[in-house]
Amino acid sequence: MNRKIYAVWAIVLTMAAGLTSCSDEENENATGLSVAAFYPTIVMDGTEVEITGSGLSAATDVVFPGGQSAKAIRVAGDDRIVATAPANVADLADVLTVITADGEVQSRQTIRKAKPAMRYFNPSDQAKTYEDLQIEGNDFLLVKSVEIGEGADAVKIDALDFKRKSNTNITLTLPGETPVGSSIPVKTHFQNGELLALGKLDIEKGVQPGGKWVEQEIDLYNGGDVEMGGWSGYINTIYADAFANAQIGDRIRVYIKDQTEGWQQGSFKHGSTWAGLTDELGVIGLSNEDFERGYYEMTIDEVTLPLLQEAGLIVSGCNYTATKVVLIMNH
């Protein structure tokens, strides 16, 4: 590619990344009301959406796509509110509008109603206990757990125990107590209590492994604490060659401490453009549980692996301190 054209595209991509980053220019009206970012970007009835910006404590309404008002608004400070999504948010992605007595402002990000759908199981013919099951579909971001079987024999695997979870894939290891037989029903539980039947699966007993894979942690960054502040801090010394031997299923873990300002967000960014590796990974809401555990992480998949091997990784966020970043390999 012509170098001048490449340079122009690099500038364009960098500017585009800025439109969705919490750290860059916010949408703001004359009264100082602004929306910097929100999470998540897909919702179901009752999903809580954290909105950050300024002047938000004066919000009287948050309007979702389709003209639907939030069920409730909880003020966590002038720079953060939590809006509860209504039931009939539009399927087509559009902006959020925050309204006060003095005016209104729209977000740069878009949001839409989640439409969870099942595509297929892998393996599709015969799954085995102690082995991995992949569930491929759409809009799995808000899945809370997967239930296999019915009645007293059913087993439930919580999202924290998934080997991988993205918006299109859930990978889990079938526990030894999973019901076996033909046409075992599988369904997902969502955070708002809704259920989605995924279909039925033939399951047989597998061989219990004699031991466990030994996970190997490889330092990607171990150069001292980095205070992220209000998206002002970052780690940008994780280069592409660090991922030369990485594989799909490996994990990148950011060790964290020091919650500040009442809300925290993490981010995994493209090492060149500063855009999120994916829409979901660009802004990640961090919970109290993440800080109790001491880290947040992502699983490398077929989308993110080539990006990492091409351009490396930038870790950023707001209102926490990163202490170390590691690559976790189990192969």
Image (cartoon, helix red, strand yellow):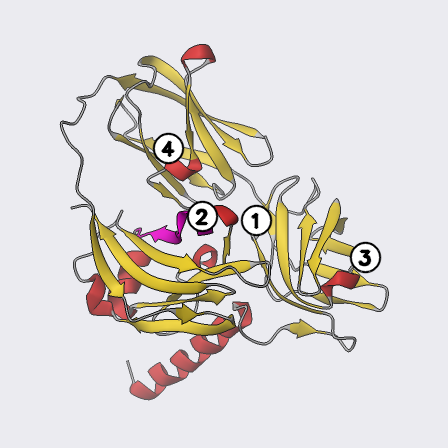
Front of the two marks 1 and 4: 1
- Span highlighted in magenta in the image: 290-301
Q: Which residue is mark 1?
A: 42
Q: Position of residue 100 (x, y in %)?
A: 81, 63
Q: Position of residue 328 (x, y in %)?
A: 25, 52
Q: Classify 10 Å Cα crowding around label 4: few (below 14), some (14-19), many (20 and above).
A: few
Q: Which residue is mark 4?
A: 120
Which residue is located at x 51 percent, y 71 percent? 229
Q: Classify 10 Å Cα crowding around label 1: few (below 14), some (14-19), many (20 and above).
A: many
Q: Amino acid at mark 1?
A: Ile
Disc 1 from disc 4: Cα separation: 22 Å
**Marks 1 and 2 close (CB-CB < 8 Å):** no
Up the image or down, 313 lies above or below 10; here it is above
Depth check: give the residue in front, 229 or 126.
229
Disc 4 from disc 2: Cα separation: 35 Å
Front of the two marks 1 and 2: 2
Disc 2 from disc 3: Cα separation: 34 Å
Where is residue 32, by image quadrant? bottom right
Is residue 150 located in the magenta-colored stretch of the structure? no
Q: Amino acid at mark 4?
A: Tyr
Up the image or down, 57 lies above or below 64; here it is below
